[in-house]
Image (cartoon, rainbow, N blue to C red):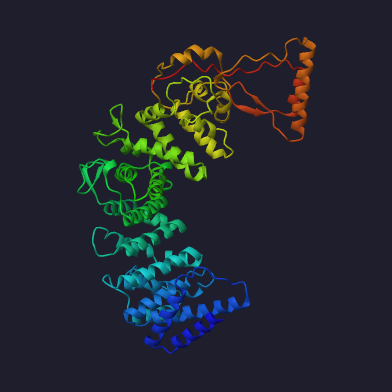
Amino acid sequence: MALRMDLSAIIEQMETGEQDAALTALQGYNKEMNQCFTFSREEERDREEGEIQKHLGELVLGFLGRELQPSCQLACLETVRILSRDKDGLDPFISRSAMSTLARYAGITKPMEDQVECEGEQAEDVSSELVKEASPPSENADQEVIVEALKSICNILLHNETGQVVAADLQLIKGVSKRLKQCHGPTWNHEVRFFDLRLTFLLTALRVDVRAQLAQELHGISLLGNQLDATLDLCWPDTLETARAGLEDVPPEELPPLSRQQIELAMEILKILFNITFDTARRKVDEEEAAGYRHLGAILRHCLMSRADGEERTEEFHSHTVNLLGNLPLPCLDVLLMPKVQQGSIEYMGVNMDAVSMLLEFMEKRLDRGHKLKETLLPSLNLLTESGRIHRETRKFLRSKVLPPLRDVRNRPEVGSALRNKLVRLMTHIDTDVKDCAAEFLFVLCKESVPRFIKYTGYGNAAGLLAARGLLRGGRESGIYSEDEDSETEEYREARAQINPVTGVVEEEQPNPMEGMTEEQKEYEAMKLISMFDKLSRNNMIQPMQLRMDGTMREMTSDDLQKLTHNPAVQPDEPTNSGSEDEAP
């Protein structure tokens, strides 16, 4: 009740039209409600308060259409920001004229003659009148006013689809892009830059048309790449090689952490770039586009090798970097290997593997955490898979770390704490995407060779991927890989004949369960087993499958099972010998 009386009193002060009275009333309201983020509409009293809040919003917008002193502008916009947190109370703010007013205070409108385009003469007259009366901030206006307006627009976009449509129609992305181009100048403070980026992120996340407009018409890759370059304070000692300005000779591991403000801005930029590049990896790009993506890739490599103040913040920063790297065209990922090998660098085959090693370390950290693997692990695992598939040096380095020459032939591939063991365990994960991705990564490291894949994972773990690829009878996928070389260890060579290919380890010899049975007893047991399969199949509890000659699987029908009942002497398909080929690490 007290709040409703306060609102009524505020509205009375607003209705007088006097700036001083309105300013005092709004400042009191803003102070009291500044930390209020939840609004209820469950009770009748709450609904009445909601209507009063809407009326307050209309009055505040009316004030913003007049010429106001700066302190009153700021108080009005603070009130709009608070009211726009209520997703059920946005009606006063989602009209074209209201959004235009907020956009003018944010400094992101189009040229004056293009601002007002309303349907119907009456709407056009009203909006034109507002433009004449209003005193929108210029580029040198109080930046607190700009920030409050940007926050209000962000709240509206976050909660209301009509507001999203109006924002797209008003071409707000053009206004904010124009200001983003000034990233190298000191004109705008951190908050203006941050909420410009937050607004751009929301527009590109919520509107496909704005996403395409920023990427193509407004050259978003170049625009935001320059923004990221300026934010990280980079210099370019060589083509596609970055360094921190003033710290060119300092090794990456000795660089000071990026500041909180740099990290905040950089992560917003990375999220926007992710939105506008999410389909890039799946389409061909021309030479000019590829050059732009390589330039961006070099900056992302720098992000990967940088750290924030605190492990948690660093991991979040790297996570956004990895997500975006996964969107780049695959041939452009060669920028990860381009920096020269320096003292302290991880070198492999004469190539700098610092970035690849960092990706592997990041992936294993996510794997060990085991939380929401589909969201947290797959981006880095997919990126490593595709990098290994297309770059020989990357694949060989990853294989040396993940699948070193096999020495342990007594423990199952999924048992142990090595990275190989952890990934093999994922191959039977309950989430199909997770297990497929883990299997694909190991398959690529095995150069998509079925015998080698079985050697390192066991036939039982490998069967899912092999069945999906039609490779259960052995063979190899048509990847482009170097010739095989033998790198078997002495331990593996000695035990190879005793290794069970299904489990991938040497097992103690087990007694034959059919020893001592007559042929009639064996036939009886076989028919009994087939009858059990038939019963389970008829009850839709299992789906029996049969291996075709080409290595693919087909469903077995009841007729197939009946035929087997009459002819149980079935020759089983033996898994392909797993020790026939290998390569140098």
Above or below for 323 versus 107: above
- The answer to whether any part of residue 75 appears in the image is yes
In this rendering, position of residue 45 left or right of residue 218: right
Dividing the picture into quadrants, the one containing residue 29 is bottom left
Using the image as rendered, state which of residue 578 and residue 35 is in the foreground.
35
Give the residue drawn at x 31%, y 38%: 335
- The answer to whether any part of residue 216 appears in the image is no
Q: Position of residue 414 (x, y in %)?
A: 54, 29
Q: Position of residue 365 (x, y in %)?
A: 44, 40
- Quarter occupied by the N terminus: bottom right
- Quarter occupied by the C terminus: top left
Q: Position of residue 93 (x, y in %)?
A: 46, 73
Using the image as rendered, state which of residue 29 and residue 195 is in the foreground.
29
Q: Position of residue 387 (x, y in %)?
A: 39, 35
Above or below for 120 versus 211: below
Give the residue drawn at x 26%, y 34%: 344
Above or below for 236 versus 53: above
